[in-house]
Amino acid sequence: MTESEKAVFDSIQFYERYSKIVDQNRSEERLETPKKEIVESIITDLNYKAKYFRKENFFQIKVEECRTEFVLNIILKYGRVEPVYFAKSKLSGLKIGSVAMRICKQLDLLRGVKRPVSLGAPSFSNYDELKKIVQEILPVFEDFKSEVLSSQILEDIA
């Protein structure tokens, strides 16, 4: 992760926000196999459209703004939500983003912080908990989009 990329994530308080989402959403019991239709309904109710990828078992929200493609993948695995935030310039082909846990780990490394275990992922035991998690990761996605565009990072990375 470059300093420019770090600045994007720091400016939206990515680490702090994701860490809070994980800490506030730790279910002992887990809904291991949520129904695709119900998850799609949750995302639709939150005013987003998502495409489901069956083989990899994730939902993808894709938006294009200012010749930049923004993607939020919502991976549902073992009753956990693993968000992937990603942006790619249609002009330069430059990219930024990763799995939220990896972004946090990279931010830790750049700050000289060594944790014995990663933050992990928020977990859920029912659809209400899943909806709450999705409601919390979406504003982070919106702020990520705004900051990527305003920082013009995808024109500066190299």
Image (cartoon, rainbow, N blue to C red):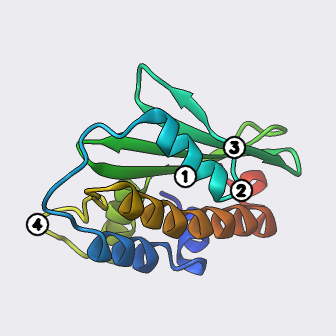
SS state under label 3: loop
* Mark sitting on residue 42: 1
* Cα distance between the residues tagged 1 and 4: 34 Å
Write down the residue under mark 4: 116
* Cα distance between the residues tagged 4 and 2: 38 Å
* Cα distance between the residues tagged 4 and 3: 37 Å
How packed is label 3: few (under 14 Cα within 10 Å), some, or many (20 or more)?
some
Write down the residue under mark 3: 49
User: In front of the other: label 4 or label 2?
Assistant: 2
Mark 3 and mark 2 in contact? Answer it, CB < 8 Å: no
Q: Earlier in the sequence, mark 4 or mark 2?
A: 2
Please determine whether, in this image, residue 35 is positioned above or below residue 157.
above
Write down the residue under mark 2: 47
Q: Residue at x 80, y 69 (%)?
A: 150
For the view shown, which residue lies furthest in the right direction?
A: 66
* Cα distance between the residues tagged 3 and 2: 7 Å
Task: Report how many numbered discs are placed on residues in the image.
Answer: 4
Mark 4 and mark 3 in contact? Answer it, CB < 8 Å: no
In the image, 140 versus 2, the foreground residue is 140
Q: Residue at x 39, y 55 (%)?
A: 127
